[in-house]
């Protein structure tokens, strides 16, 4: 009788495992389908995708350049009036434009489908959490999505224009003109946008690391000065411009992100101490 019960329990565990595997497969299929649909939609609107979004930071009428120019007039800093149209985009491979269209459509589809993808993953994970964990994780999908979209917008409206202006106009000699390939331009914009979106997930990462005990608020405070130096270095790399104002535009939000992460870590650590006590 005992052996039968043991076998029955083993069979039940095996069935549960395969049921979870089937559910995971179904979740992944829904995510893939959602990504495929949103990418197709993005692909269909080629003019909007390229003329109004991807190539917009190359025009001096872009909203960021106009805002900088007005700010430069107010601060008596004419160097803030940026004209990024000093270089030309060219296509040097047969499939270059089509490949760029496909890549941009995929990235745009990923950004549009992200809320649904996270929601599907949350639906899969939720049954394995207890009531307290579900309550603590409430709103996680919205927060993760909001942080990622904020990072994407920050990159598109701030980082990308500064990067394009500096690198597009940089010259080692007057005998060398800049003719940037379309694939290089597109890959630079998309890579920077995705990286900045992931960077803005820092508060979520710090929350998780604090919860499992790897990071503490004291640790973050101890290395605050090192973080400031690191942020300035990152800002210098992202905006390789001698203009300190441009670097501060990037550095200040990144430092604010660190302070937000520190506040979240402190709150989580305090909650853990209260529960332990």
Image (cartoon, rainbow, N blue to C red):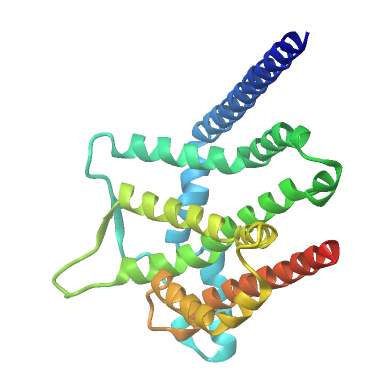
The quadrant where residue 42 appears: top right
Q: Is residue 60 left or right of residue 209?
A: left
Where is residue 123, by image quadrant?
top right
Front-most of 234 and 18? 18
Q: Residue at x 39, y 69 (%)?
A: 165
Give the x, y percent position of residue 10: 68, 17
Residue 205, x across and y down, in percent: 61, 58
Residue for point 72% across, 53% down:
143
Q: Is residue 201 visible?
A: yes
Query: Eyeballing the image, is 118 above or below 209?
Result: above
Q: Height in image: 48 above or below 167? A: above
Q: Residue at x 58, y 32 (%)?
A: 38
- Given residues 186 and 139, the one toward you in this image is 139
Vertical side of 172 occupied by 127: above or below: above
The residue at the far bottom in this view is: 76
> Where, by quadrant of the figure, is residue 148 drawn?
bottom right
Point 35% across, 36% down: residue: 99
Point out residue 199 in the picture as x, y percentages from the top left corner.
Answer: 54, 60
């Amino acid at each position: 009788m005992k052996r039968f019960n043991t076998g029955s329990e083993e069979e039940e565990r095996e069935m549960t495992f395969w049921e979870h595997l089937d559910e995971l497969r179904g979740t992944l299929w829904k995510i893939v389908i959602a990504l495929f649909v949103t990418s197709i939609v993005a692909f269909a609107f080629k003019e909007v995708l390229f003329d109004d979004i991807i190539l917009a930071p190359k025009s001096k009428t872009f909203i960021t350049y106009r805002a900088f120019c007005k700010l430069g007039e107010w601060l008596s800093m004419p160097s803030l009036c940026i004209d990024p149209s000093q270089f030309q985009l060219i296509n040097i491979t047969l499939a270059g434009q089509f490949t760029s269209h496909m890549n941009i459509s995929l990235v745009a589809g990923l950004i549009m489908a992200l809320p649904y993808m996270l929601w599907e993953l949350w639906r899969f994970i939720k049954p394995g959490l207890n009531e307290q964990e579900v309550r603590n994780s409430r709103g996680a999908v919205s927060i993760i999505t909001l942080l990622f979209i904020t990072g994407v917008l920050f990159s598109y409206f701030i980082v990308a224009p500064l990067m394009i202006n500096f690198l597009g106009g940089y010259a080692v000699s007057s005998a060398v003109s800049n003719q940037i390939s379309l694939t290089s331009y597109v890959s630079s914009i998309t890579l920077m946008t995705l990286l900045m979106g992931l960077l803005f997930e820092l508060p979520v990462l710090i929350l998780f690391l604090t919860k499992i005990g790897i990071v503490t608020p004291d640790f973050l405070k101890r290395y605050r000065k090192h973080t400031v130096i690191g942020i300035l270095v990152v800002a210098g790399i992202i905006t390789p411009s001698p203009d300190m104002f441009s670097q501060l535009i990037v550095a200040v939000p990144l430092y604010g992100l660190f302070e937000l992460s520190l506040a979240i870590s402190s709150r989580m650590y305090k909650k853990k101490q209260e529960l332990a006590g």
